[in-house]
Amino acid sequence: MSVTVYGLASGRSLKLEVSHEDREKNLLDFLRSHGVMISSSCNGAGVCKKCVMQNELLICTFTVESYEKEYPNTSIEISYL
């Protein structure tokens, strides 16, 4: 499995491979572990609302696996990247 991250500001995309261990991580931790700097002053508690993707979803509220199940074949779109 892989995850594609698309930066709306830069127009760049990254394709990140997902290991078996990565599937249980939340998307915030997964992206950060792959060098994608995501804003989050609450560090994943879900209160600052800075880690928004697709203009409405919070990266910190999904595991990699749950995001893939709920939104299959959808890239992660981040406005400020």
Image (cartoon, rainbow, N blue to C red):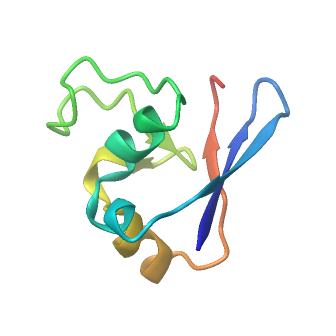
* Closer to the camera in the image, 35 or 75: 35
Q: Is residue 12 left or right of residue 41?
A: right
In the rendered image, residue 23, in percent from the top left (x then y), is placed at 36, 67
Q: Quadrant of the rendered structure where residue 74 is?
A: bottom right
Horizontally, residue 63 falls left or right of residue 43, namely right
Placement of 63 over or under 41, stated as above or below: below
Q: Residue shown at 27%/54% (left/top)?
A: 61
Residue 68 at x, y = what percent? Answer: 49, 74
On screen, residue 52 above or below 62 = above
Q: The N terminus is located in which quarter? A: bottom right
Find the residue positioned furthest to the top. Answer: 41
List x then y, in percent, for residue 6.
72, 43
The answer to whether 29 is drawn above or below residue 39 in the figure is below
What residue is drawn where x is 17% and y is 32%? Answer: 47
Residue at x 31%, y 62% (from the top left corner): 63
Quarter of the image containing the C terminus?
top right
Query: Residue placed at 55% from the left, 44% from the top?
Result: 55
* Residue 21 pos. (x, y %): 32, 64
Which one is nearer the viewer's eye here, 71 or 37? Answer: 37
